[in-house]
Amino acid sequence: MIQVVVTGIGVFSSIGCDRETFWNSLVSGTSGIKGIRAFDASRHKSRIASEVVPFEPEKFLNFKQVRRMARVSQLAGCAAFAAVRDAGLDLEREDPHRMGCVVGSAAGDYYNLEQQYDRFKEKGPGFVNPLAIPKVIPNMPASNVGIALGIRGPNLGVSTACATGAHAIGIALGILRQGLADVVLAGGAESAITPYVVDGYACMGVLSQRNDDPGTASRPFDADRDGFVIGEGAGVLVLETLSHARDRRADILAVLKGFGMSCDAYNIAIPEPEGTAAAAAMANAVRDAGLNMEEIGHINAHGTSTKVNDKVEAKAIEKAFGERAKTVPVTSVKSMIGHTLGAAGAIEAAATVLTLHRGVIPPTINYHTRDPECDLHIVANEAREAQVMAAISNSFGFGGQNGVVVFTRWS
């Protein structure tokens, strides 16, 4: 089987817009959650978010590209360019037909959708921006990355709610294994901090309302958690066949070893209570990697900080790992960057790769009160040095769509 490796990381998040800043913020337990700045949230139940501020897309994209792209596509494009630069990939030397792009978004561009709808209601037909539809449709992040970088091989957008980023990486793994490309840029992007989206989630009762203390609002697996914090950002990995990476003498960060997925087939918003399908996704991923559960030394959890999701994920981990569920170190980086929706699986995959590469497990901050229904080995509040050889990253989306990726340390 063709081996697939990670050679570059591009991350745009509230705690850093380059690999080193992002990683240093993770291991130091820095929170990027603050009061919402994207709009006046004073009348909203939840008034906090994890925003990419400042964001300067002009550093990677030209004026015309920026003007034609929605913010979600700008984030995807910037993360892709950063990943290519991080990988030392010379695009002029690559065959564009042997390069692919799989980048997804769960929400797409709600900002322009809301803005242009208001414009339509106010002025009537004939005044909607001609770019309104091309900006909004969910495949635009992948398409814009392909256009901006001149990638002519396999290109597709993925939209599977909060599992989007993980599914994009898993699909890219399949493309490379099938020999359809030598290099694939894979990940997810999201920018949906808008009045409608924030209120919609708040009315579902899933957002934290700790508005007076944003930095401690996201508390995955903690008994006092009261909901997730909405976030934005993008994560893109440069994935290559091992032979291609060796031919160009690339620095290898980790091996993308396996991918597994499943469906709860239960409810559009509530995970199946026993976590059976989520456990199956973990088992499928580890099996695909040619490993066994005893070899997994770290779990980068989905860990949203909602009462139900964290409890079900804990059950799923217990089902998949048995007694080892109480000893395998578990981290949720959402404690620091909130829930970045379609970008989450990709940003958290990047964190998992760096955990293996750097020999340090980032903490789950704001974890102070044990929840007996989440009986896991949480890496609480402080990073931990550990030479992890294999790790999984979990992503579970609305509709019961589950995706799990497996990485191993490169040596």
Image (cartoon, grey):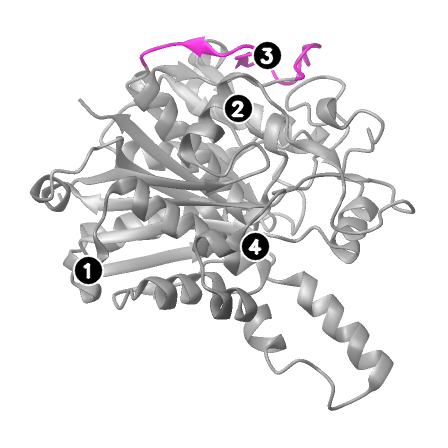
Coordinates of residue 112 in the picture (x, y in percent): 67, 67
Residue 62 in view (yes/no): yes
Q: Which residue is mark 3?
A: 381
Whole-Å distance between the Cαs marked 2 and 1? Answer: 33 Å
Whole-Å distance between the Cαs marked 3 and 2? Answer: 13 Å
Residue 180 in view (yes/no): no
Q: Label 1 amino acid?
A: Glu
Please, what secondary structure does the residue beneath circle 1 have?
helix
Whole-Å distance between the Cαs marked 3 and 4? Answer: 29 Å
| Labels 4 & 2 near each other (Cβ < 8 A) | no
Vertical relation: 41 (above or below) 379: below
Which of the image's four quarters has the N terminus? top left
What is the magenta range? 366-387
Whole-Å distance between the Cαs marked 4 and 1? Answer: 32 Å
| Labels 4 & 1 near each other (Cβ < 8 A) | no
Q: Residue at x 30, y 66 (%)?
A: 150
Q: Residue at x 61, y 57 (%)?
A: 107
Name the one closer to the observer, 369 or 380: 380
Q: Which mark is residue 92?
A: 1
